[in-house]
Amino acid sequence: MKLIIAIVQDKDSHLLSDEFAQANIRATRLSTTGGFLRAGNTTFLVGIEDERTEEVLSIIRENCESREQLTPPPIHLEASLDAGMALPVPIRVGGATVFVLPVDEFYRF
Ligand code: 2BA
């Protein structure tokens, strides 16, 4: 068995939940915050049999879009610029950041 941890953008999380439910994949959603942008994102925990790991990854791949987001410039850079020049910087976020971990034991009591 594997534990899949997938960090996705909030915008994709409802569709992804629906797709998991339709495929009869059990998942837990956590409301999380990215350490860099400090904006909300959603983390899914999915416990899944080894042979269905690829299916879960495909569903994530197909339903999570990569998008450009504007973020304020880094503080050290901002301090060296005139206030009017501290323009937001575009960065590319997501589709999804995914970790696949082996599960030693799994219980549902
Ligand atoms: P954030 O930490 O808010 O990062 C949002 C986006 O900012 C990242 O998108 C990346 O494009 C950029 N970014 C992050 N750290 C950076 C840095 N030190 N320098 C320059 N740009 C940086 P993604 O890579 O797609 O990550 C989306 C979210 O996934 C992250 O939100 C974080 O919540 C999570 N994440 C990404 N990599 C992770 C990791 N190795 N461990 C744990 N969580 C991770």
Image (cartoon, helix red, strand yellow):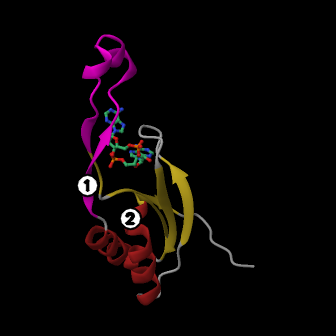
The residue type indicated by label 1 comes to: Arg
Which residue appears at 25% of the width and 21% of the height? 85
Spot occupied by residue 6 in the image (x, y as percentages of width and height): 43, 60
Front residue of 39/46: it is: 39
| Residue 81 as seen in the image, left or right of residue 4 | left
Residue at x 57% of width, y 61% of height: 30
Q: Single out the residue that lies furthest toward the right.
A: 109
Q: Residue 84 in the image: state x and y as whole percent.
A: 28, 21
Quarter of the rendering containing residue 88 = top left
Q: Position of residue 72 (x, y in %)?
A: 35, 32
Q: Which residues are magenta?
A: 65-91
Q: Which residue is pictured at 45% across the width and 76% down the height?
A: 17
Q: Which residue is mark 1?
A: 67
Residue at the front extreme, as displayed: 84
Dot 1 and dot 2 residues touching (CB under 8 Å) = yes
- As shown in the figure, which amino acid type bears the numbered disc 2? Lys
Figure check: 45 above or below 107 = above
* Mark 1 nearby-residue class (10 Å; few <14, some 14–19, many ≥20): few
Q: Identify whether 37 is placed above or below 103.
A: above
| Mark positioned earlier in the residue sequence (1 or 2) | 2
Out of 46 and 106, give the one closest to the viewer: 46
Query: Does residue 69 show up magenta in the picture?
Result: yes
Q: Which residue is mark 2?
A: 11
